[in-house]
Amino acid sequence: MEKTPFTNEQFAHLGDGAIAYVKEMSSEEITKLFPEAPAIEPGLKLFALLSAAGAPIVLTDSRDTAVASAWENKLQTVSLH
């Protein structure tokens, strides 16, 4: 088995402060994933800008706004499949 050049902790922090991703989510998903979030009207389509580690940065109703927020914070957005 080939050894990875990163420790588990280093791999967990890969991209911190430099990489983020935009994820389309329903308001119900937001409430489940982030219980500390304020109450949100059910049935809404929202876009979350998330850090490389999955921490929420911005929540908006526009993908363009989420991407613009990444640019403002000097974060490179990546696609997840």
Image: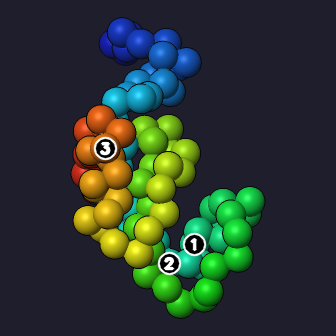
Q: Are marks 3 and 2 in contact (CB under 8 Å)?
A: no
Which residue is found at the position 26% from the left and 65% from the top?
64
Relative height, residue 79 to residue 3 (above, below): below
Q: Which residue is mark 1?
A: 29
The one nearer the camera, 49 or 71, is 71
Q: Which residue is mark 3?
A: 72
Mark 2: which amino acid?
Ser
Along the polypeptide, which appears first: circle 3 or circle 2? 2
Q: Are marks 3 and 1 in contact (CB under 8 Å)?
A: no
Quadrant that contains the N terminus: top left
Q: CA distance from mark 1 to mark 2?
A: 5 Å
Mark 1: which amino acid?
Glu
SS at circle 3: helix
Q: Which residue is mark 2?
A: 26
Which residue is found at the position 49% from the left and 85% from the top?
44
- Report whether residue 80 is seen: no
Task: Kindly give the residue lying farthest to the bottom in the view shown.
Answer: 43
Residue 38, image x, y percentages: 70, 69
Residue 28, image x, y percentages: 60, 79
The 10 Å Cα crowd at callout 3, few under 14, some 14 to 19, many 20 or more, is few
Mark 3: which amino acid?
Glu
SS at circle 1: helix
Residue 71, image x, y percentages: 26, 44
Q: CA distance from mark 3 to mark 1?
A: 26 Å
- Tally of marks: 3
Q: Are marks 1 and 2 in contact (CB under 8 Å)?
A: yes
Residue 65, picture quadrant: bottom left
Residue 27, image x, y percentages: 56, 78
The one nearer the camera, 21 or 12, is 21
